[in-house]
Image: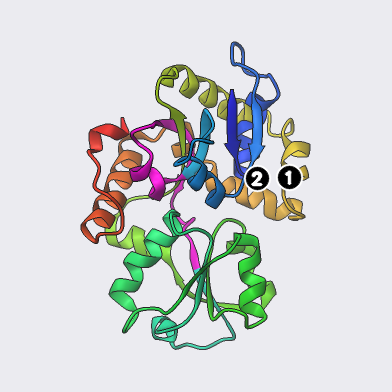
Amino acid sequence: MKIAYSPCPNDTFVFHALAHGLVPGAPELDVTFADIDITNRLATSEEGLDVMKISFAALPWVLSDYALIPCGGALGRGCGPLVLRAGGSDDGAAALSGRRVAVPSERSTAYLLFRLWAAQNVPGGVGEIVVMPFHEIMPAVRDGLIDAGLVIHEARFTYPSYGLSLVTDLGSWWESDTGLPIPLGAIIARRGLDREAIAGWIRQSVEYAWAHPEASRDYVQRHAQEMSPEVTQAHIDLYVNEFTADLGADGYAAVEALLGRAAREGLVPSIDPAALR
């Protein structure tokens, strides 16, 4: 089974058992490690794989060919994307008016949340949007190559070391506005494959990871892009949670709320919520 997920600690932690033949009855995996912007594009091309980790924000473009798997993804509370800028200015959202902002993908949940937040909070709107790999964003902001950056994942723990300041926490904004968790990364499988079987294998892989955290440690750290073990563990603790094992009612409600609001704003195509299940 051909699968693509990121080298980030939450994904390698979740898929370690499945990728190493530790889930009974599961097929052998052919793993491609890819940034979320790459998998978002792969899912809309003929090169799309059997199973992929993409942004929930990209779902409206792929649901005709792929089904949402109700486990293995990334949702949560207190784990949202951050908007950062250099220095310690307290101008807040106004500081982004007409500015160049780097984002990790134009079809990422982070970018969708940013667009929804900016429409309400940035006078006159932001200026140019520049897409770059997420690990390049903080250095670019620090070095003055970009005015502000939208960051995800472990940047939540490391941005002060780049001399950057927080403009807003989009997760906190979303949670206070909706009362729902933030839907970040989704697992999808090509339609025609056995969705229930794939979900079962992934869920067993998650449960194995929780039961045997030491088993995946070398695999996770090897792909963690020079993250310290402490940051790696904090990343896993934040992004691998109850919603990773099962989306549940709150998870589905969060996805429907995000995509429904974005569709009303003209940011994504409208979808039938029934297509998510």
Circle number at residue 9: 2
Residue on which the image places disc 1: 223
**Residue 275, located in which quarter of the rendered image?**
top left
Q: Is residue 88 above or below residue 37?
A: below
The three-letter code of the residue at mark 2 reads: Pro
In this picture the colour scheme is rainbow
Q: Dot 2: within a 10 Å radius of its alpha carbon, few (fewer than 14), some, or many (20 or more) residues? A: many
Q: Tell me if label 2 and label 1 are in contact, CB under 8 Å.
A: yes
Residue at 74%, 30% in the rendered image: 215
Q: Nearer the viewer, residue 181 or 190?
A: 190
Give the residue displayed 53% in from the left and 60% down from the top. Answer: 104
Where's residue 265, x and y in %?
Answer: 24, 61
Residue 219, horizontal then vertical, whole percent: 75, 37
Judged from the image, the secondary structure of the residue bearing numbered disc 2 is: helix
Image quarter of residue 248: top left
Q: Please tell me the numbered disc located at residue 100.
A: none
Q: Nearer the viewer, mark 2 or mark 1?
A: 1
Q: Which residues are magenta?
A: 55-82
Please tell me which residue lies in front, 205 or 120. Answer: 120
| Residue 230 vertical placement versus 240 (above, below) | below
The verdict on residue 69 being magenta is yes
Q: Estimate the x, y position of residue 238 in percent, counting from the top left.
A: 55, 49
Residue type at numbered disc 1: His
**Residue at mark 2 to residue at mark 1: CA–CA distance:** 8 Å
* Mark 1 Cα-neighbour bin, 10 Å: few <14, some 14–19, many ≥20: some
Residue 212 rendering spot, x and y as whole percentages? 68, 28
